[in-house]
Image: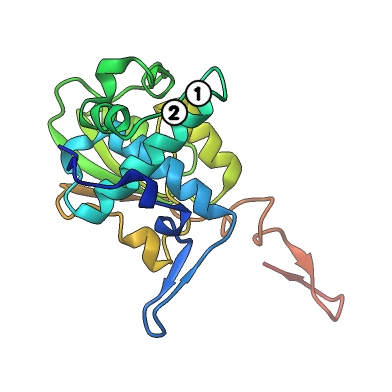
Amino acid sequence: MIAKKTVIQDIKLANFPEEIDEQNNIKVYGETSWENQLAVLSHYLHNNDCIESKESKREVIYAIREFLEQKKESKEEEITDEYVTKVAEDPTAYGLFSDFFNVPFPDPKKPKFTFIDLFAGMGGFRLAMQAQGGKCVFSSEWNKYAQKTYLANFGEMPFGDITKEITKSYIPRNFDVLCAGFPCQPFSIAGVSKKKKSRTGNGIQG
C-alpha cells in the first residue's frame, strides 16, 4: 500500500538521479533520469508487492502522477493527490496502464520462481525463463533501442547502466535466479573479433 501521508507535490525529478556519488554526497542528473522514472513505474506495475522502502514508494507516486499528467485529455483537468494515491494503491483497477500489460510476452500467471534480468538486451533470457515459469522482478539494459524493444515485448522499461550505484539500488532483496547476458563483441563478426591485418602487413591479428 502507498502511504497516504506522502505529499505528492514535494516529489520532484530530484528523486530520480542518474547516479549517486556517495563519497561526496552528490546526485547526478542527465537524460537517463527520465528513463529511471519510466523504469520505476513499469516495474511497480508488474511487481507492486516488491516495493518495500518509503523512498521507493515516493518515487512510484511521482512516476504515476507524471504518467497521469501526460495522459489527461485537457490542460484544465486537475490530477489530485487523492486520485494519484488511489491509483497507486491499486493501479490495475483503473485501466490506465493497459499498454504495460497488453504485450506479446506477459509474465506467467502462476510463477514458480523469480529472477532478475541483467544485460537484458531485447529479452532473450527472459523469454526462456518465463517459459519455465519464472517471473522477472528486475531488468537492466543500457542500450536505448534494446530498452524500447524490451518495453514493447514485456511492458517493462529496463533500468539503465548496472555499473551505477543508483541502478543497483533498485534491485530487490529477494529473488531466486540471476540471469545475465554477456557482450557479443568477442565473437561477433561485426565486433572486435573481425580479423585485421597486422601493422607489419605480414600476418593477421584476431
In the rendered image, the vertical position of residue 11 relative to residue 42, given as above or below:
below
In the rendered image, the vertical position of residue 32 relative to residue 22, given as above or below:
above
- Name the residue tied to disc 2: 68
How crowded pointer 2 is (Cα within 10 Å; few <14, some 14-19, many 20+) is rated as some
Residue 201 at least partly seen:
yes
Q: Percent position (x, y) of residue 83?
A: 30, 27
Instruction: Name the residue located 45 percent from the left edge and 40 percent from the top edge.
Output: 38
In this orientation, which residue lies closer to the viewer: 104 or 68? 68
169 relative position to 19: left or right? left
In this orientation, which residue lies closer to the viewer: 1 or 153? 1
- Name the residue tied to disc 1: 71
How crowded pointer 1 is (Cα within 10 Å; few <14, some 14-19, many 20+) is rated as few
Q: Give the image quarter of residue 206.
A: bottom right
Instruction: Name the residue located 44 percent from the left edge and 39 percent from the top edge.
Output: 157
Instruction: Name the residue located 73 percent from the left edge and 61 percent from the top edge.
Output: 195
Q: Residue furthest right?
A: 201
Q: Amino acid at mark 1?
A: Lys
Residue 123 at least partly seen:
no
Q: Are marks 1 and 2 in contact (CB under 8 Å)?
A: yes
Q: Percent position (x, y) of residue 10?
A: 37, 52
